[in-house]
Amino acid sequence: MISSERPLVQTISDKMQSGYRYVLTEPEGQHFDPLFQPDLTPKQMLFLGIFGGRYMTDCIHEYPSSWFENAKLCSKQHDPRLNYFLVNASQPLRYWQEKGWIYHEDPRGWFQWYCRYYLGRRIPFEDRRQITRWKSMKRHVSQLTKHCAKGDIKCRPKQRQALLHWAYDSRVL
């Protein structure tokens, strides 16, 4: 059964997409690919502080309002002080576009894909691609465990913030 909070078909019109429609085929937060086991939900990530607070400020209506309760957001500019680790660990969107990492259905990138996947949208080819990208971030987990004392969240803050952007919780390493 799909969550009753969100309609089965989402129609999106915001600064980056107009008239885009997708269908929720899985219950919110359930039935993930077995290879995709993120540590954090989108709501937890927004609460902790990601992307300098600038991410998704014009499209919050697409997602459950509860995700934005106590979220660290700033609609005017990217502010690294809103990030959990207080550092900038982001590349501009145009960098990701130039690398060819942006899929047309998710013009904001990986986190937008994850939010929609979490809600229950499935696009098999794109899901596999994004899960592969997510798994490749594991190398940063290995770097932290190799070079940082367990529990030292001040060690390698930029790397930790980057992991947070990908739903890895480096606070527990």
Image (spheres, helix red, strand yellow):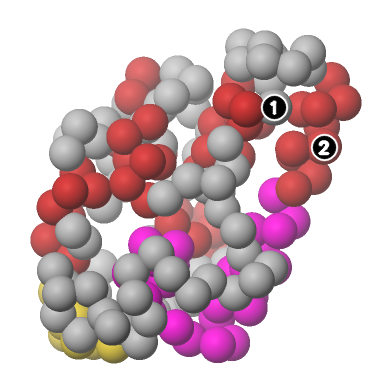
**Image quadrant where residue 149 sits:** top right
Front label number (1 vs 2): 1
Span highlighted in magenta in the image:
112-137
Residue tagged 2:
142
Residue tagged 1:
173
Depth check: 77 or 150 in front? Answer: 150
Instruction: State the predominant SS element of the stretch in magenta.
Output: helix
Q: Is residue 134 visible?
A: yes
Residue that appears at 32% across and 46% down: 43
Using the numbered discs, state the Cα–Cα distance from disc 1 to disc 2 in whole angstroms: 10 Å
Can you give x and y, in whole percent of width and height, for residue 74 in the image?
21, 34
Name the quarter where the N terminus is drawn.
Answer: bottom left
Is residue 11 found left or right of 133 in the rendered image?
left
Residue that appears at 37% across and 32% down: 49
Depth check: 72 or 37 in front? Answer: 37
Is residue 134 found left or right of 40 in the rendered image?
right
Tell me if residue 56 comes above or below residue 120 in the rendering.
above
Which mark identifies residue 40?
none
Total marks shown come to 2
In reply to whether residue 81 is colored magenta, the answer given is no
Tell me if residue 110 comes above or below residue 167 in the rendering.
below
